[in-house]
C-alpha cells in the first residue's frame, strides 16, 4: 500500500510538471473580441436652469452673515443665483423682475439636513414623484446629505434632480456604507490600498463623502481617513454608541461625529479636546441614544396625526402607526434634551454643531431637530445656524449655500413668522425657493417659473388602494433604521 501511494504521488508530480512545461511552450492566444480600449457607457446631459428675474420685496431677511437680520429687505435673483440683498430702500429692483410681496414674512437660507435618510428608489427604479422628497421641500429643506443609502438609487436620483427630471432637494450622499461587520456589503480594510480602492470606487459613482461604519480597529478607520484625504473626500463615521470610538474619531480628524455620544453628560475634558478641533457634531436628537428621543417627545406634545402639511405629502399608513398612539413620559425622562445640552456646550467651547434629522418624520422632523437644539439651550439664531450655514460648511458647500448673500444659490425658505426669535414658527413655510425656482410650499406647485400643477400622489387618486409595496427603506443594515 505504501509503495502504491508513493507511485501515485510521483505520477501526479510528473503530470503537473509536464503541464507546466507545456504551458511555457504554448504561444499566448489572442484575446477574442477584446476591444483595443474600454467602451464608455455613460452620457452627458444639461443641468436644469432658467433665467427668471425675481425679487422678494419687504421681507425680514435672516442672512446668516454673522447675526445680521434686515428688517425690511429685498432679495433679487436671476436664474439660480442671488444678485442683490439689502434694505428695501437701497436695493433697486431690475426692470421686468417678478415681485413677490414679503411683508410679514421672514426669509431664511434653505435648511440643510446633513443626516437625512430616505428612500430614493427601489429595485433600480427612481419614481417620477417621491413623496418623501416633496415633504422635505414643503418644510423648507433644500439640501440633504444622506450618510447611508443604496449607491445604485441615490446617485441616480441626484443626477435626475440636477437635470430637472424630478423635484427634490439637492441630493448628496455617501452611498453604501463602508461596513466593517461581516455582511453582503462588507468593505474589507486591511491596508491603505484596500481603503484607497473603496474610496476610489465611491468617488467614481458620485459620492462626496464616505461613511466609515464600525470598522472594528482604529488603524482600519485611520486607513480610510488617509485614503479619503488623498482623494479629497469627507469621512463621516457611525457614532455607534461607542464613546471611546467617538473620542478617537475626534482625535484622528474625521469630518464629524454622527449621532449623539452615548453618555448622559460630557465634562470639560471632552469639551477642551473636541472644541479645539474642526470635527463637527451631528447629534441626531430625533434618535438620541440612552433613553426616549426627540421624535417621541414631539409626537407626545402635538397632534401629528392631524398635521395638515404633513398629511398633504405623506401617506396615512406612514404617519398613523407612531402619531396616533405616541409614547408618553414625564418631561425629565426625555433623553434628547440632555444630548442637546451636550451639543450646546460643544458650541460654546468653539465646536461646530449641524442639524441631522435622520429621516424621522419627513420634513417636519427637521423642525423637531431644530426645536430640540433649542431645548438644549441654543438660542433660536444658533439653532438656525446649525440648520443652515454650519450644515453647509460641514459638507463643503458653504461657498454656494447656507446664507443669503450675493453670488450664492437662491435657496431659501420663506416663513410666516420670525424663526430667529420664535424657533417654533420655523415650520410655517409659505414658499420654498430652490435654485431660484419658487414653489408654493403648501402644494409644492411651481409658482415661478410657472409649471403645471403637481400630479396627485398615489394614495390620493380615487379608486387606488395604498401601495403597500412602496418602500421607505434608506439603506439601513441594522434593521432598525437608526444610523
Image (cartoon, rainbow, N blue to C red):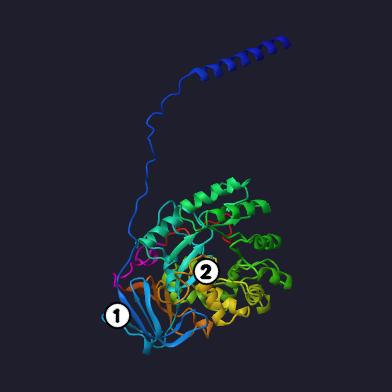
Q: Are marks 2 and 1 in contact (CB under 8 Å)?
A: no
127 and 88: which is toward the camera: 88
- Dot 2: few (<14), some (14–19), or many (≥20) neighbours within 10 Å? some
The answer to which image quadrant residue 430 occupies is: bottom left
Q: Position of residue 415 (x, y in %)?
A: 44, 81
* Magenta stretch, residue numbers: 449-465
Residue at position x 37%, y 72% in the image: 81
458 falls in the magenta region: yes
* 250 to the left or right of 53: right
- Residue wearing tag 1: 98
- Residue wearing tag 2: 393
Residue at position x 54%, y 72% in the image: 390
296 and 394: which is toward the camera: 394
Q: Quadrant of the C terminus?
A: bottom right
335 falls in the magenta region: no
Query: Taking 37 as reference, is 421 above or below it?
Result: below
Q: Main secondary structure of the magenta part?
A: loop
- Dot 1: few (<14), some (14–19), or many (≥20) neighbours within 10 Å? some
Determine whether the residue tagged by mark 1 lies in a helix, strand or loop: strand
The answer to which image quadrant residue 289 occupies is: bottom right
Q: Looking at the image, can residue 267 be seen?
A: no
Q: How far separated are the C-alphas under marks 2 and 1? A: 31 Å
Q: Closer to the N terminus: mark 2 or mark 1?
A: 1
369 and 291: which is toward the camera: 369
Amino acid at each position: 500500500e505504501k509503495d502504491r501511494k508513493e507511485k501515485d504521488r510521483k505520477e501526479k508530480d510528473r503530470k503537473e510538471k509536464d503541464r507546466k512545461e507545456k504551458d511555457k511552450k504554448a504561444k499566448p492566444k489572442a484575446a477574442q473580441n477584446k476591444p483595443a480600449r474600454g467602451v464608455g457607457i455613460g452620457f452627458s446631459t444639461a443641468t436644469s436652469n432658467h433665467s427668471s428675474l425675481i425679487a422678494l420685496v419687504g421681507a425680514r431677511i435672516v442672512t446668516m452673515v454673522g447675526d445680521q437680520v434686515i428688517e425690511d429687505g429685498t432679495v433679487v435673483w436671476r436664474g439660480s443665483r442671488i444678485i442683490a440683498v439689502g434694505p428695501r430702500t437701497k436695493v433697486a429692483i431690475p426692470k421686468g423682475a417678478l415681485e413677490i410681496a414679503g411683508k410679514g414674512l421672514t426669509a431664511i437660507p434653505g435648511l440643510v439636513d446633513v443626516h437625512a435618510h430616505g428612500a430614493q428608489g427601489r429595485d433600480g427604479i427612481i419614481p417620477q414623484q417621491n413623496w418623501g422628497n416633496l415633504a422635505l421641500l414643503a418644510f423648507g429643506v433644500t439640501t440633504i446629505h444622506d450618510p447611508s443609502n443604496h449607491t445604485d438609487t441615490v446617485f441616480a436620483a441626484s443626477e435626475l434632480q440636477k437635470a430637472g427630471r424630478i423635484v427634490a432637494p439637492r441630493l448628496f450622499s455617501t452611498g453604501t456604507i463602508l461596513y466593517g461587520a461581516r455582511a453582503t456589503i462588507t468593505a474589507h480594510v486591511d491596508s491603505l490600498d484596500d481603503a484607497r480602492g473603496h474610496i476610489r470606487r465611491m468617488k467614481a459613482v458620485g459620492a462626496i463623502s464616505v461613511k466609515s461604519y464600525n470598522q472594528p480597529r482604529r488603524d482600519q478607520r485611520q486607513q480610510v481617513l488617509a485614503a479619503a484625504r488623498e482623494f479629497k473626500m469627507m469621512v463621516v463615521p457611525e457614532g455607534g454608541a461607542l464613546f471611546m470610538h467617538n473620542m478617537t474619531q475626534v482625535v484622528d480628524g474625521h469630518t464629524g461625529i454622527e449621532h449623539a455620544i452615548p453618555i448622559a453628560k460630557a465634562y470639560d475634558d471632552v469639551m477642551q479636546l473636541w472644541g479645539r478641533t474642526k470635527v463637527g457634531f451631528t447629534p441626531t436628537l430625533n434618535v438620541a441614544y440612552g433613553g426616549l428621543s426627540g421624535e417621541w417627545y414631539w409626537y407626545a406634545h402635538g397632534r401629528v396625526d392631524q398635521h395638515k402639511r404633513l398629511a398633504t405629502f405623506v401617506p396615512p399608513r406612514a404617519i398613523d402607526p407612531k402619531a396616533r398612539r405616541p409614547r408618553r413620559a414625564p418631561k425629565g425622562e426625555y433623553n434628547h434634551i440632555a444630548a442637546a445640552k451636550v451639543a450646546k456646550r460643544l458650541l460654546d467651547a468653539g465646536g461646530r454643531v449641524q442639524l441631522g434629522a435622520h429621516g424621522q418624520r419627513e420634513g417636519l422632523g427637521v423642525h423637531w431637530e431644530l426645536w430640540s437644539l433649542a431645548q438644549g439651550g441654543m438660542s433660536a439664531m444658533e439653532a438656525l445656524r446649525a440648520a443652515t450655514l454650519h450644515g453647509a460648511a460641514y459638507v463643503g458647500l458653504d461657498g454656494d449655500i447656507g446664507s443669503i448673500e450675493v453670488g450664492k444659490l437662491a435657496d431659501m425658505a420663506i416663513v410666516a413668522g420670525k424663526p430667529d426669535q420664535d424657533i417654533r414658527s420655523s415650520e410655517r413655510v409659505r414658499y420654498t425657493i430652490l435654485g431660484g425656482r419658487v414653489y408654493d410650499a403648501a402644494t409644492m406647485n411651481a409658482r415661478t417659473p410657472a409649471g403645471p400643477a403637481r400630479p396627485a400622489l398615489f394614495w390620493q387618486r380615487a379608486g387606488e388602494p395604498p401601495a403597500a409595496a412602496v418602500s421607505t427603506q434608506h439603506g439601513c443594515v441594522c434593521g432598525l433604521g437608526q444610523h
